[in-house]
């Protein structure tokens, strides 16, 4: 994230950049055993990832309250609101999110040769966790279409979305309390395969695999929740 010094205040929505940070940790173990015509291969791995998207700190002082608005609250991460005027103008402080994922994976494969047959059996298990916070909607958004200038605007500014923006008359304002979700998943699959060498020039392969779909389980009795745990950042108007 970087601040702009192109203005006296240093707060320039056109040159400020959004921040993205991410970390991950991974570990994997595996081993292979063999005994005569049998080969057994086992593997285990763990991955933990964390990514965060945040607006530019240089725009926090341009949140809706600092711009002079009353009767509306700011988000947990205050930034410049989103302004959209019909005709092409779109400016925003950016989105915010926080995502954490974990994954445990285990797999076992068994190979066996018997005459003209090469048999393979295997299974894998995966345990996944996801925690995600999305509070972008806490910072308000305003849409200007020109209706105010159409009926009350002076002459040449009739039906002008930019005039509505300058005068501060939005057609629509949007604000949400944000959402968060916390779910876990248990996935597995199993397969069997047979390679049959019919001749020196012909090998037939057949097999089956089953990967059942198992829905993720919410940890909070619902897949997605509103961020009522932060009531101080909800809209008050």
Image (spheres, rainbow, N blue to C red):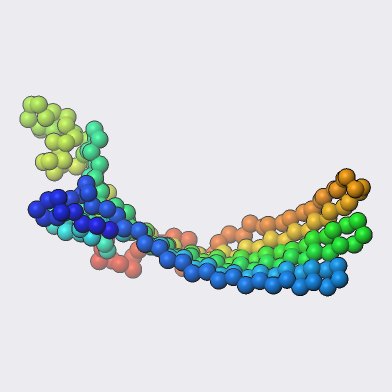
Residue 94: x percent and y percent? 29, 52
Q: Is residue 151 left or right of residue 83?
A: left
Q: Is residue 203 left or right of residue 159?
A: right
Residue 135: x percent and y percent? 33, 59
Q: Residue at x 22, y 49 (%)?
A: 15
Task: Give the quarter of the figure containing the C terminus.
Answer: bottom left
In-front residue for pair 139/224: 139
- Seen from this angle, which residue lies furthest left? 154
Q: Is residue 50 left or right of residue 170?
A: right
Choose top left, top right, bottom left or bottom right for residue 148: top left
Q: Is residue 58 left or right of residue 54?
A: left
Q: Residue at x 80, y 56 (%)?
A: 193
Residue 232: x percent and y percent? 25, 66
Q: Residue at x 55, y 62 (%)?
A: 216
Residue 46: x percent and y percent? 56, 70
Task: Give the quarter of the figure containing the N terminus.
Answer: bottom left
- Seen from this angle, which residue lies furthest front? 200
Q: Residue at x 11, y 30 (%)?
A: 157
Instruction: Report if residue 68 is visible in the image.
Output: no
Above or below, 169 against 211 in this view is above
Choose top left, top right, bottom left or bottom right for residue 38: bottom right
Report the label total.
0
Instruction: Report if residue 93 is visible in the image.
Output: yes
């Amino acid at each position: 994230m970087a601040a702009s010094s192109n203005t006296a205040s240093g707060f320039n929505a056109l040159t400020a950049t959004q921040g993205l940070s991410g970390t991950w940790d991974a570990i994997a173990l595996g081993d292979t055993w063999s005994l005569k015509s049998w080969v057994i291969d086992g593997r285990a791995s763990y991955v933990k990832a964390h990514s965060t998207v945040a607006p530019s700190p240089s725009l926090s002082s341009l949140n809706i309250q600092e711009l002079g608005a009353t009767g509306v609250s700011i988000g947990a991460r205050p930034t410049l609101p989103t302004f959209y005027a019909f005709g092409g103008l779109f400016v925003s402080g950016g989105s915010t999110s926080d995502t954490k994922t974990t994954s445990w994976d285990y797999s076992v494969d068994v190979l066996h040769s018997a005459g003209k047959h090469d048999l393979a059996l295997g299974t894998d298990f995966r345990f996944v966790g996801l925690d995600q916070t999305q509070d972008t909607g806490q910072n308000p958004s305003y849409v200007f279409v020109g209706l105010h200038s159409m009926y009350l605007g002076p002459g040449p500014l009739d039906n002008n979305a930019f005039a509505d923006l300058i005068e501060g008359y939005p057609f629509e304002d949007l604000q949400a309390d944000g959402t968060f979700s916390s779910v876990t998943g248990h996935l597995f699959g199993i397969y069997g395969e047979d390679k049959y060498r019919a001749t020196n020039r012909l090998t037939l392969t057949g097999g089956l695999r089953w990967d059942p779909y198992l829905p993720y389980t919410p940890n909070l009795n619902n897949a997605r929740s509103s961020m009522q745990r932060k009531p101080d950042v909800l809209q008050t108007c």
